[in-house]
Image (tube, rainbow, N blue to C red):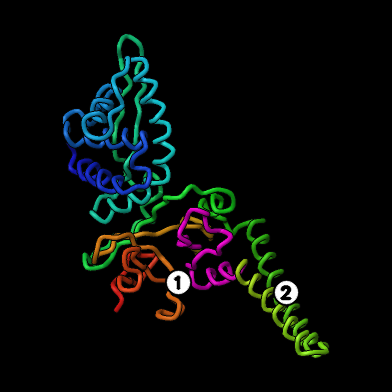
Amino acid sequence: MDESLKKAAELIKEVSSEWKEKDQRCVNVLHALVQLTIDKPEEAKKGFTNRELLECVNQYFKHWGDTSEGDLASKVSGEWRKLEKLWGKKEKGIAQRLSVQGINEVPRLKREIGGGGGHSSKYILTLVPANHENLKDDFHANESLEQLQYFEDDVDELKGIARGLSRGFLLTGWRKWVFFSIMLTAILTFGVVLLLFFFGISQQETFGQAIKFVGSIVIILWAEWSLFGGFFRVIDRRVEVAPLWVQPWSSDNDWLLVFEKNKPTAPNVIKLKRYTAKCSTCGGLVRIHQGVFSYPNRLVGKCDNSPREHVFSFDHYLRVGSERT
């Protein structure tokens, strides 16, 4: 078997064992495919049948029970469709992990549908060149093993605005003018509210009325900044924690807005991304958060196991970080 494919299979086996979906049947199918690829390298390129996948699932992971050949094919193919959907969320992070190991190839799940006459469908794990999918520019391999390596991992089900932003909001054509029109409206509203404050505060007859008036103005300004502040900051800083109304409900508020400006082969775009890493101290999950008072105006990686002590810097472009002291 090709050495790169073996590394890919081993890496997928390790990474997928930590997914929250790891106990789902579709991931059982992935685990079986990866295990067979490792155990039977001479057959990996030809692929494995429904029966081989089921036997591997029963042996290593979760017992599905014995089924007839027809039921087996239906069951495996159904889980395979679910796996393909899940894989679309996971493959970029896996490909980035491979790039760190010097493999600029993208893992792909492939199904060759069998014909009649006893020819069963075959399921294959394969690799394609990264530049074939225009992904190579996104990989910045970490040359220093002492640095923490971040990867783009999608582990939440994105819906609505979050789903749209994860695909990218292009700042070209009419979208560009819509974006800047909204930002200009927000600025003008902010200015009007400030003017209202300066002119209105002197009109309050009692101290209690003044307090209520000031409180109302503060709430309005806070709400506006919460809604649009992240979009202002990301244009200048290139990366910023996404506003709460954009964050997926199931997340830990660690999704980021990323402004990709003047890339050679792509227009300016704002994307919603999530970066995670494996803590070099304890092996826990590192998420990105605001540095707040300890690291003002910085984004830092904090380990779930010890967020006050296991803290790392965060470079979203190179996807690396180093331990903070």
Side (left or right) of 1 relative to 257: left
- Quick one: label 2, few (<14), some, or many (20+) residues within 10 Å? few
Mark 1 and mark 2 in contact? Answer it, CB < 8 Å. no
**Residue 226 pos. (x, y %):** 60, 69
Residue positioned 63% across, 74% down in the render: 222
Quadrant location of the N terminus in the rendered image = top left
Q: In this view of the protein, which residue sits in the foreground, 258 or 285?
A: 285
Residue position marked by numbered label 1 in the rendering:
290
Location of the C terminus by quadrant is: bottom left
Find disc 2 in the rendering and name its residue: 188
Q: Where does residue 315 sit, x and y in percent of width and height?
A: 37, 68
In this orientation, which residue lies closer to the viewer: 1 or 62?
Answer: 62
User: Does the segment drawn in magenta span residue 128?
Assistant: no
Q: Does residue 259 appear to the left or right of 152 in the view shown? A: right
Name the residue at 25% across, 37% down.
Answer: 34
Q: Identify the image quadrant of residue 210.
A: bottom right
The answer to whether residue 49 is visible is yes
Residue 253: x and y in percent read: 48, 62
Q: Amino acid at mark 1?
A: Gln
The location of residue 263, given as percent across then percent down, is 46, 61
Residue in view at x 34 percent, y 32 percent = 110
Which span is picked out in magenta?
A: 228-257
Determine the image quadrant of residue 111. Answer: top left
Q: Amino acid at mark 2?
A: Leu
Left or right of 189 in this view: 248: left
- List the single residue furthest toward the top: 117
Residue 258's mark? none
